[in-house]
């Protein structure tokens, strides 16, 4: 324990106790409606949900490098992910988070990391949960770094339900902050695929009250950022992109459409999002996704954002995509794994005062091997006290109320403002939930 911490608090031992749960893996060889199976391999994890098969590849940023529509392709003869567009190839799997400079052609992507982490952390008959961690890199191996030279990571959690609905939580993790120059674009969750235009295709960008339908073809589907309108503000803070994968005339699979909904108030504190559209006839690639172009040099710090994804057989139109956005807005906890909160008995302390710090929350899924950390930082962001708890297990729907730390403020305490941070980690040390609170220690 840091000696400075003696001036702030006295530790009372505490163990994080949660209900134990055994989750047995379930494997099957054929798909049925509302079914899900997962297969853990040496370099990744394969998930089959109903008639969609996805392969999360640790040698490709932990992203999806294989997508099969088993309804029309049970023999897996056609991989619908674009992984052959040289020189970028591995940078553009099915979904990716990336930065792109259209003026220099430079791309930094989660798909660039050939040694990413892919782990299965929950496996039930109703859902599979995976966690991945990838550096943001170029194809040549250049690593995106923060202002102090630390590698920047994107940590992701995928909840794949047997219904086919997928929620994704991503954390852009920079120990300090990342400086982005004017003109660079940020794609928080982008889609790319093999696709050749034979006829028109209709793409949607939408929120709960509005849907912009873009009818495009080979001549008009271009990387022209300013030509696509800004999405109007939505008081419910949801927007999305709909992609007609079922349209075989533009290289679709003949069965599925893909809908993605975002919460834009979580995305680098801007709401000027557009649908960026790029088509390359030479490389037979169509891309689309939400994008923000930085108009001035900006600092981007660690932040967590959420999306939901649906592979649907139903036709997409303005009404259906708005309903999808509304569903996300009405189910605010849909993309959350767990909620937690940290509380203190007071906000202002002086020597001799009794202090008590509490943690509470709720889990939406079954987890094993959880750990937690209580961290206290001073106004200089220096850690003056830290304590770990666990491991423990928790069940879906279980709530918890914990006394984290109690004691008396010492007479030699250092007057300052402090931040109390409570974090809960998965078995592979990716944050599941986090909460912080500010307190002040005054002079006598």
Image: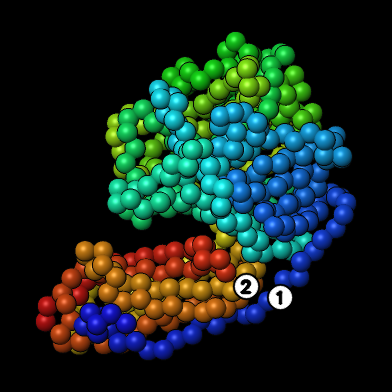
Identify the mark at residue 83; answer none if there is no mark: none
Identify the mark at residue 22; answer none if there is no mark: 1
Secondary element type, mark 2:
strand
Secondary element type, mark 1:
loop
Could you tell me which residue is drawn at 49 percent across and 85 percent down?
15
Instruction: Please say if 225 is above or below 55.
Output: above
Front residue of this view, candidates 87 and 410: 87
The N terminus - image quarter: bottom left
* Residues at discs 1 and 2 in contact (Cβ within 8 Å): yes
Q: CA distance from mark 1 to mark 2?
A: 8 Å
Quadrant position of residue 233: top left
Residue 438 visible, this orientation:
yes
Residue 167 visible, this orientation:
no
Instruction: Please say if 223 is above or below 179.
Output: above
| Chosen colour scheme | rainbow
Could you tell me which residue is drawn at 82 percent across and 39 percent down?
76
Quadrant position of residue 362: bottom right
Mark 1 neighbour class, 10 Å CA radius: few under 14, some 14 to 19, many 20 or more? few
Name the spot of residue 33 as percent of width and height, x first: 84, 49
Front residue of this view, candidates 142 and 329: 142
The C terminus - image quarter: bottom left
| Left or right, residue 397 beside residue 153 | right
Name the spot of residue 63 as percent of width and height, x first: 61, 46
Residue to which mark 2 is pinned: 368
Could you tell me which residue is drawn at 77 percent across and 43 percent down?
52
* The residue positioned farthest toward the front in the image shown: 140
Name the spot of residue 373 as percent of width and height, x first: 43, 73
Sequence-first tag of 1 and 2: 1
* The residue positioned farthest toward the left in the image shown: 444
Could you tell me which residue is drawn at 47 percent across and 45 percent down?
136
Front residue of this view, candidates 28 and 43: 43
Name the spot of residue 205 as percent of width and height, x first: 56, 28
């Amino acid at each position: 324990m840091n000696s400075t911490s003696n001036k702030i608090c006295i530790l009372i031992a505490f163990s994080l106790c949660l209900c134990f749960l055994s989750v047995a893996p379930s494997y099957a060889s054929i798909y049925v409606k509302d079914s899900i199976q997962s297969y853990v391999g040496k370099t990744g994890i394969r998930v089959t949900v109903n008639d969609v098969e996805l392969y999360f590849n640790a040698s490709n940023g932990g992203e999806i490098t294989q997508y099969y529509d088993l309804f029309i392709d049970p023999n897996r003869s056609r991989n619908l992910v674009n992984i052959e567009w040289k020189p970028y190839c591995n940078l553009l799997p099915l979904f990716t988070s990336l930065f792109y400079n259209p003026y220099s052609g430079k791309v930094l992507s989660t798909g660039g990391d050939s040694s990413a982490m892919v782990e299965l952390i929950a496996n039930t008959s109703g859902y599979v949960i995976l966690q991945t961690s990838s550096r943001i890199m170029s194809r040549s191996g250049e690593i995106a770094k923060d202002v102090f030279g630390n590698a920047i990571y994107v940590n992701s959690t995928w909840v794949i339900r047997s219904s086919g609905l997928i929620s994704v939580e991503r954390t852009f993790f920079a120990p300090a902050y990342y400086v982005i120059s004017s003109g660079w674009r940020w794609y928080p969750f982008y889609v790319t695929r093999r696709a050749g235009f034979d006829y028109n295709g209709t793409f949607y960008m939408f929120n709960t009250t509005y849907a912009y339908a873009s009818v495009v073809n080979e001549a008009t589907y271009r990387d022209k950022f300013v030509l696509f309108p800004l999405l109007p503000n939505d008081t419910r803070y949801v927007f999305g992109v709909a992609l007609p994968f079922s349209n075989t005339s533009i290289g679709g699979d003949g069965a599925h459409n893909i809908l993605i909904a975002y919460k834009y108030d979580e995305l680098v504190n801007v709401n000027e999002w557009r649908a960026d559209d790029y088509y390359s006839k030479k490389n037979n690639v169509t891309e689309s996704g939400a994008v923000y172009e930085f108009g001035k040099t900006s600092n981007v710090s660690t932040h967590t954002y959420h999306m939901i994804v649906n592979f649907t057989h139903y036709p997409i139109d303005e009404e259906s995509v708005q309903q999808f956005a509304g569903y996300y807005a009405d189910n605010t906890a849909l993309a959350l794994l767990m909620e937690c909160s940290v509380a203190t008995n007071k906000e202002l302390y002086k020597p001799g005062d009794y202090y008590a710090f509490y943690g509470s929350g709720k889990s939406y899924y079954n987890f094993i091997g959880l750990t937690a950390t209580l961290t206290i930082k001073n106004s200089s962001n220096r850690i003056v006290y830290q304590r770990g708890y666990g491991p423990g297990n928790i069940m879906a729907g279980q709530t918890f109320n914990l006394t984290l730390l109690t004691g008396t403020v010492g007479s030699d305490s250092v007057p300052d403002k402090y931040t109390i941070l409570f974090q809960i980690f998965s078995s592979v040390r990716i944050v599941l939930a986090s909460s912080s609170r500010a307190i002040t220690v005054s002079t006598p």
